[in-house]
Image (tube, rainbow, N blue to C red):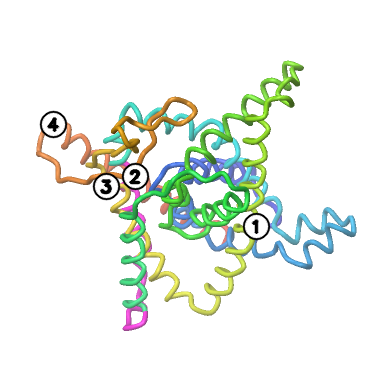
Amino acid sequence: MQSSRPLKDRIFLVIKGLAMGAANKVPGVSGGVVAFVAGFYEEFIYSLQRVNKTAFKLLFNGRIKSFYRYTNGKFLSLLFLGMIVSYFSVSKLLDYLIIQYELYVWSTFFGMILGSIYYISKDFKEWNKTTLTALILGTIAGISVSFLDPATENDNLLFVFFCGIISVSGMTLPGFSGSFILILLGNYVLLLVDSVNALNDTIIDMLKGNFEFVHNTYRIKMLKVLGVFTLGSVTGLVTFSHILSYILKNYKFITLATIMGFIIGSLGVVWPWKETIYKTDSEGLHILDSTGKQIVANYQRYLPEMNAQTYIAIAYIALGILIVLGLEWYGKRTRQIKV
């Protein structure tokens, strides 16, 4: 890990954080894939793994600089800066694009995941019975998750904390979409839409000097939900990083084969040609969230007809593959410069 980074590298690290944050927000796409193909996945995991007893001792003893260096703070802070900015900006743009150009957005993501599979597999030379079994099990797990039916919304704070732990897996485990897991748990709208909107409204009110929101029961409830979700996410991020750090050191090739399987399995989630099925009540009417949007229940996938729209979608798949190859080229070039 580098203690000093050129300005260009720092800017690119923030951009990578933007990409990870946007990917984490989109159901079916994993921010961990961005980290993997851009060449900083292992540094990300090992940096998080440094958040341990030693780090907390340094922090509680007031040795802030030592804590910052020990945890690779410059790397993590720049990356998380990009993720936070993305959460409130780039991901909003993606929400708009998915509504207006759904087929082409999913086609791009599909191409990116195809490119990720190529990236991971091209240099993988350790194929044997164990790694093939790990690949198959990972694929089955990924496919199984993509075809589960979503649960109903649950704002119990203990469950919200659990959702935070599980949802952050998309950052640490490539191919495992945290936002899609939130859909399956029934809390995607609650945790990534309603509570975030409540925070946005609160920040705007505070900037205007309006503190009436303290009497708004719903707003306070949403802020509590977001706080508990964030605490769960931090807990999950640190916990998963320790587990994955150990696994990568001791079972690297089995882990890579399993990750490859997860990513292959996630192709079912981002298959571009699908019809969205929305939740309905007992009378067959669409159930709406607090923003008036229909709540997604699942997706029905189908094979496309060959027409102009399909050809354009295929072009976007090719674009997605090229994006990943570009990230791979940049990651390889960066590693060569550092060596």
Seen at 16% across and 37% down, the residue is 311
Seen as rendered, the residue at the extreme front is 282
List the residue tagged with mark 3.
271
Marks 3/4: CA–CA distance: 18 Å
Q: Amino acid at mark 4?
A: Ala
Q: Earlier in the sequence, mark 3 or mark 4?
A: 3
List the residue tagged with mark 4.
308
176 over 254 or under it: above or below: above
* Residue stretch rendered in magenta on the structure: 108-130
List the residue tagged with mark 2.
109
Q: Is residue 191 left or right of residue 148?
A: right
Residue 250 image offset from top left, x and y in percent: 53, 79
Q: Amino acid at mark 2?
A: Phe
> Within 10 angstroms of label 4, few (less than 14), some, or many (20 or more) residues?
few
Q: Amino acid at mark 1?
A: Thr
Q: Is residue 42 left or right of residue 214?
A: left
Seen at 46% across and 50% down, the residue is 185
